[in-house]
Image: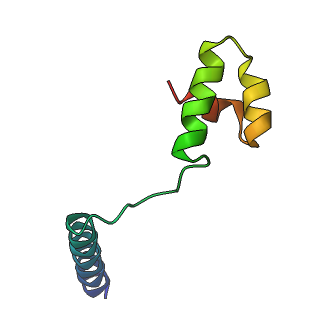
Amino acid sequence: MAGFAEFERSLILARTSEGLSRAKARGVKLGRPFGMTHHQRQEALARKAAGEPVREIARSYNVSPSTISRLL
């Protein structure tokens, strides 16, 4: 019985990887979306360059300080 389960599992893995490959080829964006828009990220970088504290910037966009730190 274990042999059949392993075989079925390998088929599932193959189909999943094929589907992901096709999606990537079509240009589908995979993964979790950004917590900030492109414009917000640019503003946050400018504010950080101006010397504003990371915690304050993060609070104003309702994101974690690590999100702001990762922008660099």
Residue, far top: 51
Task: Tell me the quarter of the image containing the N terminus.
Answer: bottom left
Q: Is 19 left, or right, of 32 in this rendering? A: left
Q: In the image, what residue occupies the spot 73% across and 28% down?
A: 57
Residue 19's place in the image compared with 62, above or below, is below
Q: Nearer the viewer, residue 22 or 7?
A: 22
Q: Is 54 left, or right, of 45 in this rendering? A: right
Q: Position of residue 22 (x, y in %)?
A: 21, 72
Q: How is the image coloured?
A: rainbow
**Can the viewer see residue 72 in this picture?**
yes
The image shows a total of numbered marks equal to 0
Q: In the image, what residue occupies the spot 55% across and 41% down?
A: 39
Q: Position of residue 67 (x, y in %)?
A: 62, 35
Q: Position of residue 36 (x, y in %)?
A: 60, 46
Q: In the image, what residue occupies the spot 65% across and 12% down?
A: 50
**Can the viewer see residue 69 in this picture?**
no
For residue 42, which quarter of the picture? top right
For residue 63, which quarter of the picture? top right
For residue 2, which quarter of the picture? bottom left
Residue 9's place in the image compared with 40, above or below, is below
Q: Position of residue 59 (x, y in %)?
A: 80, 35
